[in-house]
Structures are given as C-alpha cells and as structure tokens.
Amino acid sequence: MASRKVKMLRQVLAVAPLIVIIFQNCAEHFSPRREIASTSIISGAFAEKEIIIRLKNQGARDELLNWSVSHGMTHEHEWPDIHTHHFSWTENASVDEMLSEVYSLMPSDVSYAEPNYSFKKLDIGDDLQILASGTVTANASSVQTTAPIQFKETWPTLAVNGTRPIVAVIDSGIDLSHSVFVNSNALWRNTQEVPNNGIDDDSNGFVDDINGWDFANNDNNPSDDQGHGTHVAGIVLGTGQNIFGTTQVPAKIQIMALKFLTAAGDGKTSDAIQAVYYAVKNGAKVINNSWGGAGYSRTLIDAIAYAYSNKVLFVAAAGNDGRNIDGTPMYPASYMVPNVLPVAATNSTDQLTSFSNFGALTVQIAAPGASILSTYPNNQFATLSGTSMATPFVAGTAALMAYERPQMTSYQIRTILTSQVDQINGLTNFVWGKGRLNVLKATTFAKSAILDTDQPSYSLASQSKESSPSGCGMVISSGPKPPDGNSWAAVLILLFPVIVAIISRNAPITLRVDA
C-alpha cells in the first residue's frame, strides 16, 4: 500500500512541470479578475431608511407601490426600463426589516432588494496643498506628475482634428468657471437644451441640464462644492494637453460634469446610478469613477452593464486602504463587468504607494496617484494624492484613444490600455501583469490596431463573458488578448481529468499535445 502511494506521488510530481506550463498559458486567456459578493443581505455602509428594489417584470409594479404606500414611503425614483424603484420612509423600521418584508410579501416577483449603499471620494484629504494660482499659471513648464507615463510626449502625436469624445466625471461636480476649462472649451454642454427656459427641451427627464446635473441635490447646477471633482477633471484634461500657463489650446475631449458626491465627499448608490444612466444616454464614451465603498450593489452592476452594452468604458479607483481587494473587495472597482477597469496608484518612482489598494487578480493597471497637481475650485490649483488621482490619468488616456479611433468599444480600449503598458517589477503581485500606464504606447497602438466590430456578451446571472466571432470584439491583430475569466478556475478545470487519472490508475500517464 505504501509503495502504491509513493508511485502515485511520483506520478503527480512527474506532471507538475506540465501543470506549471498549463497555468502559464491559461493565465493569458482567462482573466485573474473575480467578483466577490457578500453572503449577507447588507455588505457595507448605507443610507438609513432607504431601499432599492428591482422587480422581475412590470406586472408587479402596482402591488409594490401599494405596499410602499401602506408604510408611508416616498417613491424617490423609478428606472422603468429595468423595473427598479427607490423608496425612502420615516416610520420606525430598519432597512433590514423592510428588505425582509418585501421579500416575504412578493417572493416570486422581486429580483433583488438592497440598501441604498454609501460611497466616498478616494483621495487622501490630509495631503491637500493649495498653490498660488498666479504662480502655477505663469509657469507653463509645470507638470501634473513627474512619473514616466509619457503623456507630454503624446501631445504632438495626436491628430489635429478629430471627434471630441465625452468623458463623464461622476464626482463632486466641477468648477464650471475655472479658467482652464473655460479657455480650453473643455466642458460638455447639452446643445439640445435651451438655457433657463424651465422646459425639458430634449425630453430626457432633466430641465435645463445645460452643463450636466447635480444628482445629490437634484438640480441643474453640477458645480463643485468639495474640490475633489474639479481636481479629477483637471487630470482628465491634462493627460492630453498642458493645463498650466497663460494660454490654453482647444481641448480634444469634452468633460461632462455629473455631481453625486456631497460637500462632505460622500454619496449614494441611487444618485451614482442615475449619473451612469445619464452619462450613457447623453453620449459619454468614458466614465471616470474616483469613488468607492464596501457595498455590493446589484443595481449599480445593472447600470454598469448598461454602460457596457453601449460600449462605454467604466474606469474605477481601487481605493486607499492599502489592502488586497482580491479578498476584501472595493466597489465598483471589484465588479467583474467587462468594461470596469480598476486602477491602483503609483508614485513618481513607479512604486505602489503606501495607501493604494492592490490585487493581482482584480487591479488591471496602475497610474500616478501621489502629489498630483491639478485644477481646484475658485480658479486655483492644488496637489492631492489617492487612487482618485490615478484613475483620471487612465480615463483621460482612454478618451485620447477614442479621439483617434471613435469607433473603438470600451472592451477594445481596455484591451489596449492593459496590454500597452510599462511592466514594472515593483508591481509584481500587486497589479495584474504588473502594468503601469503608458499614454504614448496606448494612443500609438490605438491608431493602427485592426479592430473587430463587436464585443463579448455579458451575463450577470452566469458571471460569464461569451466569446464572439473574430477576436471576441477586441483587437484582431497587434497585441495580446486581455484577461477574460478566472485563471485558477480554468487551470483546475483543465487539470481535473489529469488529477482523476493519476489517483485512479496505477499505470503511467502519457500526455500528448498534437502539433
């Protein structure tokens, strides 16, 4: 018996090199990303006395509304296309109690019900340094970062004329009167709306939304009362041009101001969701999300999946807790929708910052996020640190790629961004592929890449992405295929027959690979 066990052990050891080879090869074709959902109903901080409910069909709407009326609830918002409703109440009942009650009342009609989770901005507030505006604007050689991401080298290579893609900055708003944005004509305007006539001219559900929308206060003024959003927007713009000095060149992109974070720097799922739908329906190509939290929201996943179905890239900050989000996720960065691009923060010497979250299975790219100089409210400039600052470098680069190739999908852009990077040994075990953003590589590659016209389908129910013909909707030639699944799971599936055979048979196993 002992000799048989020894023989089996030898057989396992004999195929160990093959296991390593298979793993290395599979890692190129199966994404290391994974999505971790809480096993409990509530998984993070949330708004008191508010819930979001999605029905399986519209037929149960009246019953749901009658139930809400019986509890004196306010019907805050409805997303009719996905049968989803947001309620609030004042009576003495907890979120958990209301969730349990609606599940019990309508067990066959409720797709899901969840709290209205809270999110927060992802900068290091103590790191803020406001600079004298005159000093910065007079110095055209000022740079946002000295990290070698080759963004300044990219500027002369960009096309003179192109279609200006829209980057939606879902944040605390933007200082709409800042000279950098005004002089470069960088801010998106809703040309279908007549200013200040009190009419929803374009019938999009928002009155006089000329400059975007403030979802935190439900008005048409997305001005920044916190500072974070203005700083983020400046990084997005500054990735493609010099935002310092007294002269501003016309922007090659448009920045859409969508406010959902309050002056305190926090916001709700319901407002973030409305901002995502607004961005997509109004033509955004890229959405920057420099915020996050611990709440696993199915409603937010639905919104991101809607963005993906419209080929919109969703760039998300990995967070600033210095933790591995492979095991303890940060949302929305940890969602596995194919258009989500999680970003970690590096310093000027290409090392992961001490505050940045990381995860070799989750985080897809790193970018500078330490002491970044950018715009700040009241026509000022400031330095801030955080994955909040790293994320807009990636979003800005994605927009420049779309400027060069407007037909690119979010999946194609993510493919190129994560493959055309500088591989930094210091990011090993922290970032998938140990890649740090290189703006010049990504934009140059985008110009000549041969593209497919489709992208893989996405199903929340199966958490799978199906391959579509001709390269899975990505780059057909030039560049490696990006990640698309879980490499460990793939390896186990592939090796299962081998392991079973080793255990069940005494005879040596011969493995053949046909040429």
Image (tube, rainbow, N blue to C red):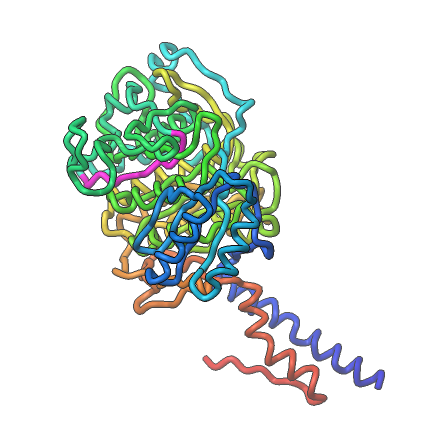
Classify the position of the C terminus by image quarter.
Answer: bottom left
- In the rendered image, residue 338, in percent from the top left (x then y), is placed at 41, 55
- Residue 247 is left or right of residue 147, and the answer is left
Look at the image and tell me whether residue 336 can be seen: yes
Task: Write the start and end of the magenta stretch as one range.
Answer: 162-172
> Could you tell me which residue is drawn at 38 percent across and 46 percent down?
314
Residue nearest the viewer, comparing 460 with 343: 460
- Residue 153 is left or right of residue 29, and the answer is left
- Residue 285 is left or right of residue 365, and the answer is left
Residue nearest the viewer, comparing 44 with 293: 44
The correct choice, above or below, for 199 with respect to 134 in the image is: below
- In the rendered image, residue 99, in percent from the top left (x then y), is placed at 52, 52
- In the rendered image, residue 480, in percent from the top left (x then y), is placed at 41, 58
Q: Quadrant of residue 398?
A: top left
Farthest residue in the right direction?
A: 2
Q: Quadrant of residue 452?
A: bottom left
Classify the position of the N terminus by image quarter.
Answer: bottom right
- In the rendered image, residue 419, in percent from the top left (x then y), is placed at 42, 51
Farthest residue in the front direction?
A: 70
Looking at the rendered structure, the number of numbered marks drawn on it comes to 0
Q: Is residue 170 magenta?
A: yes
> Could you tell me which residue is drawn at 36 percent across and 15 percent down?
378
Q: Is residue 314 magenta?
A: no
Look at the image and tell me whether residue 365 can be seen: no
> Could you tell me which residue is drawn at 33 percent across and 60 percent down?
58
Residue nearest the viewer, comparing 95 with 206: 95
The correct choice, above or below, for 11 with respect to 78 in the image is: below
